[in-house]
Image (cartoon, rainbow, N blue to C red):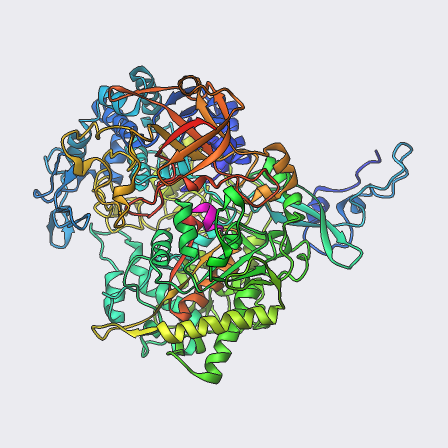
Amino acid sequence: MTNHWVDIKNADLVLIMGGNAAEAHPCGFKWVIKAKAERGAKLVVVDPRFTRSAAVADYYAPIRVGADIAFLGGVINYLLTNDKIHREYVKNYTNSAFLINPDYGFKDGLFTGYDEAKRTYAKGSWTYQMEDGFAKVDPTLQDPNCVFQLMKKHFARYTPDMVSNVTGTPKDQFLKVCEMIAETSASNKTMTILYALGWTQHSVGSENIRTMAMIQLLLGNMGMAGGGVNALRGHANVQGITDQCLYSEVLPGYLSSPAEADATYEQYRNARTPKALRPGQMNFPQNFPKWFNSLMKAWYGDHATTETNFAYDYLPKRDAPYDIMQIFENMHQGKMNGFISSGFNPLAAISNKHKISAALAKLKYLVVIDPLSTETSEFWKNYGEFNNVDASKIQTEVFRLPATCFAEQDGTFTNSGRVIQWHWKGADGPGESKSDQEIMAGLFTRLRDMYKKDGGAYADPILNLTWNYTNPSNPDAAEINREISGKALVDLKDAAGKVLVAAGEQLAGFAQLVDNGGTACGNWIYSGMWSKAGNLTARRDPTDTSEHKIGQSLNWGFAWPANRRILYNRASADINGKPWDESRTVLKWLGDRWGGSDIPDMRPNAKPEENVMPFIMVQEGVARLFAPQMAEGPFPEHYEPFETPLARNPMHPNNPKATSNPASRVYKGDMEVFGNRKDYPFAATTYRLVEHFHYWSKHSDLNAIVQPEMFVEISRELAKMRGISSGDRVKVSSIRGHVHAKAMVTMRLKGMKVDGQTIYHVGIPIHFGFKGLTKPAQLANSLTPYVADANSQTPEFKAFLVNIEKA
Amino acid sequence: MPEVKLTRRQFFQVTGAGLGASSMTVMGLAHAADPVFAKPNKLEKTTETRSTCPYCSVSCGVLMYSRKDASGKLKVMHVEGDPDNPVNKGTLCPKGAGILDMIESPNRLQFPEVREPGSNTWKRISWDEALTRITKRMKADRDQNFVAKNAAGVTVNRWNTFGMLVSSASNNEAGYLSAKILRSMGVVALDTQARI
């Protein structure tokens, strides 16, 4: 979230789309109710189903699965056509005025530079016009090559009629939502967007979110109380684990990890240390060397110095993508030997269960670390129709290690609003269970000892890894937290020579990091969470410290970065530093510095006349309405799901290359086995129930009692077509597999008119499987397709094709 | 019910682990002579601990009440929402409200096990055997498949025949430690629930 949970109460309009906050985040949803009760805020829900969020909404509009960009593109067109934008904000705080290379173009659903064979774009034409090292701008926003005019032209095709035709949303309902959204273009009105996997789990997931970000920028809602782009995330520490960067492309703190093209430290560092694209901008990523060098000091101590290039060569260099779909593709091809699955149940959670099962069977060794007995740990075991495998044919050696759970550990979780909270151990784990730290340390120290004793492949990065924990086999959470937060290795002095931080002392924050080896810090964005003052994540003062009681509990836990609660908060004030809305001040210019209800997201003494713009993490300093960094285009475009119920993309009926995301990765052999609309005529989607959490809570008695059994949701019309009554046993199949379930016939879904045909949805809750206390069922991901978003590689769980029949 | 004789500051101090007495005792509500309820309050003699619900990313504050069982293990016997937490303010949803049944699930793993190739059953083993066998496998795999330099002579120090999925239910400290360990071994095939 750019904002945070309590801040939702400050909104004038809450839009829930691509998510279902009332059911998936019930305790966070109270802040939506607060906004309605105390501010008279309106709740708008746009969803294929009339969910429980919709049930308490002021307005609900249905939408076909996978058509969100068409809807949101239509909103952009509405705002621009009716001049319902926050003009001053757009002109000053976005790249609307930037001039684009005249070679940039868009035709028939493809942008300039498309390579069909590689399914990628050469982005040479998606560039700014430059002069003297800076991007050229037209502050009048009239130049036909300026971002503002290009954007207008791009979205002109998203007329209300086109939107209704593609999304299935009745035109009057679409326009009503537009009207309600448009009101928040007023400088003293804000909208918040609450979204989740209904937007991310698509082959166009990143662009779904990006389109909404553009809307929030046009309306001037970024950096404002009750505004922002707010991902309601899924696990108690998914945010934290993302921030510690346990994925291939990054090192802790979102530092892009070395690739083969970064042959030397200089090449690596220079490629990641950008220059400002406009004069006087903070361009905060220019501090990359401080962050990276401090991380390597934390990992390699005296082996990481200016002379050794901070042990850069110790780090592995990527030669290819290694996201989860690629990992299992590699595994399926027999290219992987061993794997550890820790607190993750990929047989259940990744798409195309049969492919995952076949892949795991090719491993030589699998290690499952978990508090509970999962499907993945028993992928080799026959469970009849629920897991039809022959153990005697599966040669994988499988270890299953008992882990402690949250209640049995000290440590921190980071919530969706970026607040890091310490939790305390309250119980001993059952039997011989051990913590994740102890298990990983056990493996590491044994491996290191084997290399010390026996030698083998190059092992310096293992042997020289800093490991000064009090108990090397079981590092303490507090020690690790302090390492992540960072300390001075030498006395850090100010310009006058006064010692700010003595050698060995914890840092106050990332502003104190240096690039010459004087600081060690495991994750720069978390720096300051354990300072000289102690463990700030353990602070438990809930007092709202803000002037207008907008819900800023600055002394409860520690938010990253720097305890800042609302990101981009400089944008909450005009170019003179006066808040757009003085009744909900987040930040204002106090005459000599910035201050207000939050930690300034701005150099504290940057005078307004210096024109240092609010989006300090990008080179432009202003936000990107035109974003060439995206894989499928600098502007969003509607593309169909790979398994679409339609014969074509209604926006590009004559160009099959533009039917689905032209830049999504499709593995050899997978394009041919996408389901076709004749055999699988219904648009399926997966989702979650309020009583269950993924594949985890089915092991909990109370939750298993209240939701004991797999069911699917269908409309009355579809039920009638197939002769199905509520409670009947049905078989839902895709080209990849099937599930049996009870049918729930409901009015919450209705047939939708799209591109001259009627689309019927099938709703599939995911939570059931062959382990746990609920009735055994096939895993829902037996049905889902193996294709993903072109930027994030998130699988397209939310839009695919099925058939349904009475069983 | 007897009067709660506690100032606001005292109430906020009733926190953290290891108090040895529940807040009920501190507030003077335990052992109170109650004419109606003869049984002692079930939270007596428990330790109150602040934690965070592990399910969704609202990350609700919870209060856990624990005491030692007959075998000396500290066990949670009651969980409720933390009223001090500014986000959830003491509420829990159906998932969080059932959290005790997850902690105490009959499906909690207790002992290291191995399933030998081709076998249909689990076999209990010791931690030492488990960690030693796994590490031997990893070392043999890494020794055979580690790539120090690529064909162009660039140092790559990469081991891509091994990978790991790290849990989004792990705390930051365990996650960071895993990042440090995996990168030191040359692992590039790592991912987490954030991806999906």
Percent x, y of residue A159: 21, 22
Dominant secondary structure of the residues highlighted in magenta in the image = helix
The residue lying toward the viewer, choosing from B41 and A530, is B41
Q: Position of residue A484 (x, y in %)?
A: 47, 62
Front-lying residue, A394 or A681? A394
> Going by the image, does A450 lie left or right of A327?
right
Residue found at the very far top of the displayed protein: A172
Residue stretch rendered in magenta on the structure:
A345-350
Total numbered labels placed on residues in the image: 0
Q: In the figure, residue A704 lies in which quadrant?
A: top right
A677 relative to A791, above or below: above
| Residue closest to the eye, A463 or B119 | B119
Residue at image x 67%, y 48%?
A: B104
The x and y percentages for residue A467 are 50, 73
Whether residue B78 appears in magenta in the rendering, the answer is no
Quadrant (top left, top right, bottom left, bottom right) of the N terminus of chain A: top left
- Is residue B57 visible from the viewing direction of this image? no
Side of B119 where B20 appears, left or right? right
Q: Position of residue A166 (x, y in %)?
A: 26, 25
Q: Residue at x 19, y 47 (%)?
A: A119
Q: Residue A349, relative to residue A274: is it above or below?
A: above
Q: Specify whether residue A346 is painted magenta.
A: yes
Residue at the (44%, 69%) spot, across then down? A298
